[in-house]
Amino acid sequence: MKVSVWYNNEDIRIEEVPRPEPGPREILIKIVACGICGSDIVEWYRLPRAPLVQGHEIGAEVVKVGKSVTKYRPGDRVFVAPKVPCMKCDYCNSGHYPVCTNVKDRLPGGFAEYVVVPQYLVENGTYLLPDQISYDQSTFIEPLACVFRAQQLADVRRNQTVMVMGSGMSGLLHVKLAKTKHCRVIATDISRKKLDFAAKMGADITLDAAENVPQQLVAEKSGMADVVIVCTSAVEAVEQAWQCVDKGGVVVFFAVPHPDVNVSIPINYFWTRETRIITSYYCGPPDIDAAINLIETGKIKVDDMITRRLPLQDVAEGFRMVMAGKESLKVIIHPNA
Ligand SMILES: [Zn+2]
Ligand SMILES: [Zn+2]
């Protein structure tokens, strides 16, 4: 079978490997759709594990099950989480699933024709897709789950003002989710095209991030934001976040600047204004359940975010599109097309 092996963003190769066979408690899935995630192109984050087969936003069909597997059978449509926390340790018990120390198995990357799902993920990380969710739509389950968790942690509530800095894929999902809570949403980006997307997807106010953002808020007769969600690694956004968060508000780092960049925090200013800073990384099982429900019920529509569908041999092309960012939102790979 063919897999797409990522060495770095400029070196992505299609390689031939033997098609894996599932063990007694494993399943073999055929990847129908796999999204390219914004985090896939972040080299400092991915390079330590390279070369690797990327792709963690998977919609697949079960084609073969091990002899001890009773929960699934060939033909089932599934989403599989890339990794699953134990749900038993202290971290899991306090909701910090992403830092669970007992994560055993990782799902092999989905930019491949087939993947064997390890036993632990068969038992705890595989979800049957409801009929209402297409394979393409299922590629949004994982990113939406991450977005859902971040807004839970920030306690985004009805009628609040939410500012989303960076209107790429995850930023737009934040816009959509905040709109389901009837929030007033302000979206920023340096790309006019992305701001147009944000407006189309429900943002009430869109601001050019290259201009003075706090000043634009005043011009828009807008107050400051109860919640500011940083969805870009651009360091300029950090300073803007400090200036746009209201008293008693919270800044959420959903994305962070490069690790070499030092961020300084106006801690005294925050202290007197009771401003909180939180981070949100990845998601957990309850968030995946919530994301599936949001897509299944149509509360969050995702079809309008899909800009390209490409066959496996064009993964490199897909990465270039996501890196260029201008015209593309969600690029989905169809490895068996
Ligand atoms: Zn992702
Ligand atoms: Zn755990």
Image (tube, rainbow, N blue to C red):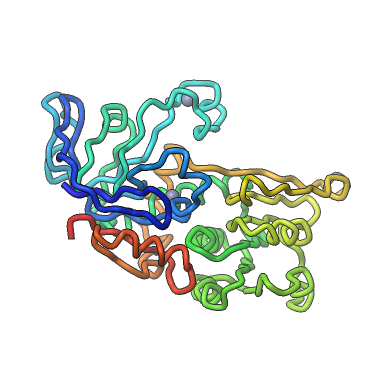
**Above or below: residue 49 compared with residue 31:** above
**Above or below: residue 29 compared with residue 300:** above
**Above or below: residue 196 compared with residue 234:** below
Q: On the rendered structure, is 164 left or right of 89?
A: right
Q: On the rendered structure, is 143 left or right of 312?
A: right
**Above or below: residue 223 compared with residue 88:** below
Q: Residue at x 39, y 60 (%)?
A: 319
Q: Residue at x 54, y 63 (%)?
A: 175
Q: Residue at x 43, y 70 (%)?
A: 328
Tell me the quarter of the picture where residue 242 sits: bottom right
Q: On the rendered structure, is 217 left or right of 2?
A: right
Q: Is residue 244 visible?
A: yes
Count of numbered tags = 0
Find the residue positioned furthest to the front.
Answer: 11
Tell me the quarter of the picture where residue 83 sits: top left
Q: On the rendered structure, is 74 left or right of 330?
A: left
Residue 261 or 171: which is nearer the viewer? 261
Where does residue 6 sit, x and y in percent of width and height?
36, 49
Q: Residue at x 73, y 49 (%)?
A: 263
Q: Is residue 295 visible?
A: no
Where does residue 108 sit, x and y in percent of width and height?
30, 39
Residue 61 or 274: which is nearer the viewer? 61
Residue 129 or 331: which is nearer the viewer? 331
Where does residue 177 sit, x and y in percent of width and height?
51, 58
Where does residue 256 sit, x and y in percent of width and height?
61, 50
Placement of the C terminus among the 4 image quadrants:
bottom left
Find the residue positioned furthest to the top.
Answer: 89
